[in-house]
Amino acid sequence: MSCNIPPEILEYIEQVEADQPRACKEQHALAALIRRIFQAEDIYVDTERMRKYFRLARYFPYDQLFPWQTFALGLWLCTYRADRTTPRFKTLFSMVGRGAGKDGVIAVSSAALISPYNPVPHYNVDICANNEEQAVTPVKDIVEALENPKWEAKLSKYYYHTKEILRGRKNLGEVKGRTNNPKGRDGMRSGAVIFNEVHQYQNYDNIKVFVTGQGKVAEPRVGFFTSNGDVSDGPLDDYLARGRRILFEGEADDGFLPFICCLNSKDQVHDENNWCMANPSLPYLPHLMQEIRDEYRDWKERPEQNGDFITKRMGIREGAKEITVTDYENIKATNKPLPDLSGWNCTVGIDYAELNDWAAVDLHFRRGDQRYDINHAWICANSRTLPRIKAPWKTWCEMGCCTYVDDVSISPYLLTDYIREAGRKYNIKKLALDNFRYTMMAEALQSIGFDAKDKARVKLIRPSDIMQVDPVIQDCFDRCLFTWGDSPHLRWAVNNTKRVRSSRSQGVDTGNFIYAKIEAKGRKTDPFMALVAAMAIEGELGTGQVQLPKIGAIYW
């Protein structure tokens, strides 16, 4: 049963779809996602409450909310599942450029949730941050509105405040700013927990403490508000990755609303019409636009002293070009049907970190410039990181592109059995795997005729081999020369991989790249690294002309 999108939410969707003002690819994907949800799901928007919430903005200096703010808050605060009591989006993750009005959004949301318009009594709002200033700034914004002589008499009927307390008179909910000091957290009864400047969080310790205090009050909500930052592999990176999986890979959102604003690439910074992609408030704030123009000039003259400009104003890190292997559009372009490859020459790549984790085999084919890959992964039930993986790996196993191994480890013979069967259909020219992993696979590989002593049959891959093949891989992505069929696990693995510059011991930049995981614990790269190994020896395929297998070419 579909639901009509209220105009307060629809206005921003239509702006994004028209690209007026310009919006990043994440916002285009989000607009499409919300349309699908409203079309397919039985949901309800409490428009009366939403409009009362939004009218509270007139008591603050900014007077009214911008379209992106009514969009995000309308979905987070007032959109419900069919039961009309369960928020459709429990969690809002909002990453916008510095100056977009993040603290104002937190202040309006907090004031709304303890207002008489919220029917859930004792709805406490805890605003959490790494330092006291960030935690209490939204609280001060609300107090300043309450003490404005123009509104003081009216608002005092609905809110009560002292230096220590900010409370809704009817709702009886309180707004408090909290830092990472663990004292006083026991017994918390949070309705909403809001985290300010998530980019500063190194780990989940404090996030877990606050969120696990929920459940005692109906309609629990969590809000993450932040600009981009420099802490790698922390909660911010995890939330960004989850948001992009939802937007681009079809992962179920499970109530997680990813509102991500950033430039699509660093090169876009030189056109100021692109800046609103990172900061959707800019079209309404000419004074902020001028301030960012000044910062842009300073950044161009002294980029080493103004690194925050790109990161916090534009939403991308200075090293963003080295973070991902390629744009996700190029990764999606690999999803094309494979031709019948029977009888073709191929190379085989193997990759695994530990046999009690993941392992992968890639069969790599070539015809002229076009590359074709058949990729399979094995997932060990004993993997310690499996609970951290949010990707739908069970679905991948059902699709047949992955195999779940219900054992303490992945037997090397599972991989060699797979390669043996492939050898009956394709002409395997050579096999490659990491130099440091061969010992664990040696016996199983020898059983099917692959011995590292025979360098014509086996290549042990070193970092220098990856450096040499990286430009070829980049060219294949850029020119959309890869065809993988529907291999979601392989696309996911590429998205989990970053390019890292390789430098000589003296620290001189060689201009070469190797690959590494974007995040070590919950992101697997084995399927992609198996492809890299197979491509490192694709010279064995020549131009890729078909050659029927010779009898006895591989020993079974």
Image (cartoon, helix red, strand yellow):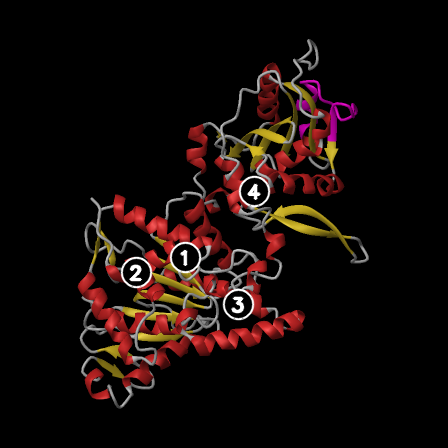
Question: Residue at label 3?
Answer: 312
Q: Quadrant of the C terminus?
A: top right
Instruction: Estimate the spatial distance between the alpha carbons at disc 4 and disc 2, rounded to whole Å.
Output: 35 Å
Question: Residue at label 2?
Answer: 11
Q: Which residues are magenta?
A: 441-459
Q: Judging from the image, what secondary structure is the residue with disc 3 in?
A: helix
Instruction: Estimate the spatial distance between the alpha carbons at disc 1 and disc 4, rounded to whole Å.
Output: 29 Å
* Tag 3 near tag 2, CB within 8 Å: no
Q: Quadrant of the N terminus?
A: top left
Mark drawn on residue 272: none
Q: Position of residue 531 (x, y in %)?
A: 62, 34
On screen, 398 above or below 176?
Answer: above
Instruction: Estimate the spatial distance between the alpha carbons at disc 1 and disc 3, rounded to whole Å.
Output: 22 Å
Q: Earlier in the sequence, mark 1 or mark 2?
A: 2
Mark drawn on residue 494: 4
Identify which amino acid the numbered label 2 is placed on: Glu
